Image (spheres, grey):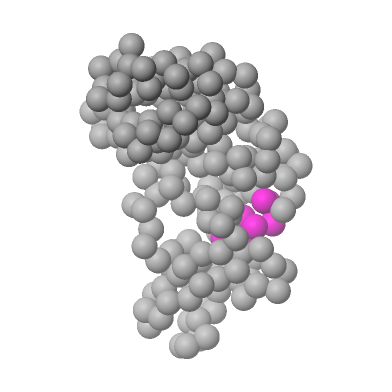
Amino acid sequence: MCDVTIPAQTLAAAATDPAAAAWTRIGHEAGADLLPWLARTCASFAIHDRETALALAGFTAVDASDEDRATYAGAIAALRELAVQGLPVASTDAIFVYLQQAILGFDGDDLWGHEPDHVNDGEVDVECPACDEGHLLDLTSDHSDIEPGLTSDLAVRLHTEAVQAGRHEVAATFTRLFGRFTCPECGVKSEVTASLAGVSA
């Protein structure tokens, strides 16, 4: 089936049932060499049944080496297309964000292949770039300490995708993730995304 350390019976169980417990093991152990299998398996599932597997595939792709990304470029492209197809009809707001994140992972974006799920968390840890003071910022409320904005082309893209899909709460949350905050300790204003604490890059 695939030259990986995950047992064939585990892969077989997962391939026949998108809700199988086997997916938990796959999620912990998947490496780049599993990408072709993930592409075939996701393609065999109904559009909503493949959502979680696509999110897993996005993490697998973004963590792959440049050499592995080149080796499995066809599988990554196929997975990306499936994620793009599923985005407008995602089953929940959270899944919508995970699919956006997966697409960025398939694109090889080392930072944003990990970070958009702050939108699902509803909060984000930041460190002031001036005084290094840490803050936990609320992304969900109009009364947040964040000044909303869209401070990059990527911000505009993710926000536009959310608006076009009718995901208005997600879109509003993106304006906070890509907004600015003023440090209450030293008064310096900075972009939230430039101040992310412990980013995955």
| Place of residue 158 in the rendered image (x, y in percent of width and height, measured from the top left) | 60, 45
| Place of residue 3 in the rendered image (x, y in percent of width and height, measured from the top left) | 25, 17
Residue 106 in sight in this render: no
Considering every residue shown, the one lying at the far top of the view is: 1
Asked whether 99 or 46 is in front, the reply is: 46
Residue 52 vs residue 88: left or right?
left
How many labels, in total?
0
Residue 113 in sight in this render: yes
Residue 199 vs residue 188: left or right?
left
Residue 8 colored in magenta in the image? no
Q: Is residue 196 above or below residue 162?
A: below
Instruction: Find residue 9 and report its image quarter.
Output: top left
Residue 135 vs residue 130: left or right?
right
| Place of residue 85 in the rendered image (x, y in percent of width and height, measured from the top left) | 62, 25
Residue 158 vs residue 33: left or right?
right
Residue 171 colored in magenta in the image? yes
- The magenta stretch spans which residues? 170-177
